[in-house]
Image (spheres, rainbow, N blue to C red):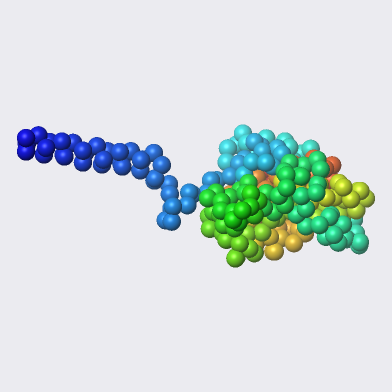
Amino acid sequence: MPARRTWLSAATVFLICALALAGWLLGGRDQPKGGAPAAGPGTSPLQNPDGTRPGLAPLATAEDRRAGRELIAQVATAAAGPRDGYDRGEFGPAWTDSVEGVPFGGNKCDTRNDLLARDGTAVERKDGSDCVVTAMTIRDPYTGQTVRWSKQQAGKIQIDHVMPLSYDWQMGAAAWDRAKRVRIANDPLNLIPADGSQNASKGDSGPAAWLPADPAIHCSYAVRFAQVSLKYRLPVTEADKKAMLRLCDG
């Protein structure tokens, strides 16, 4: 009997160790300290035409970059108009959920929190809320860094308008009705959560004057800019279009 009990105990220990190893191989390897899952690399803009999928991934293959150039080539050009009369309020209340004709609109959650939830992993929400994001892990496409964000550091991650609203105004949105301006301001295709300092440095610049810090994302950024331009039939400047095409060379 003692020998049999010893054999059973050894078998039990072996089984426990094997199960623990299998669990680590299947799911534990990619867990950073603290148990939060690693943020994903984002989605290719070519596979995300409505902006509902998370993030922005690089276009690394020659085939994808060629497809990006073909899309950019469709963008119209024009000289920028005056900035006179521009005000953020012309595009509606910031991050309003009262918007029709764009994904996530009218879902009882404001646009900012929709975008944080779209791009974040290990998302935590305010107690009793299905909307308000209080913490998350996010892969910032503009710097290539993975960031653990909390609401106490709200400015660390900001929502960037890919085609800035002032730029939109100068390229034709000044003549739109208010409803269309509210749409472009809250359309997930035109919105990317990114490093706050990157968003601040961009201002209302187009791709000829400003690009994300990470060169790996430049072509994808140009394609996303083109997607917004084409959807809203907004031209870009000649300099911006040339820059966008150049970014997807190779």
Location of residue 234 by image quarter: top right
| Residue name at image x 63 percent, y 63 percent | 154
Identify which residue is drawn at 57% across, 41% down. 60
Which sits in the foreground, 56 or 177?
Answer: 177
How far across and down, in percent of the image, does residue 179 sit? 87, 47
Residue nearest the viewer, comparing 66 with 204: 204
> Quadrant where the N terminus lies?
top left
Q: Is residue 130 above or below residue 157?
A: above
Residue 237: tell me if it is visible: no
Can residue 29 be seen here? yes
Q: x, y (%) of residue 76?
A: 83, 42
Left or right of 17? Residue 226 is: right
Residue at the image position 72 percent from the left and 36 percent from the top: 70
Question: Which of the two residues, 242 or 198, is positioned nearer the viewer here?
Answer: 198
Residue 224 in the image: state x and y as whole percent.
70, 44
Q: Position of residue 220 (x, y in %)?
A: 65, 45
Image quarter of residue 157: bottom right
Looking at the image, which residue sits at the far left? 2
Quick check: 236 above or below 155? Answer: above
At a point 15% along the width and 36% down the height, the residue shown is: 8
Quarter of the figure that contains the C terminus: top right
Residue 101 vertical placement versus 174 (above, below): above
In screen coordinates, is 185 left or right of 223? Answer: right
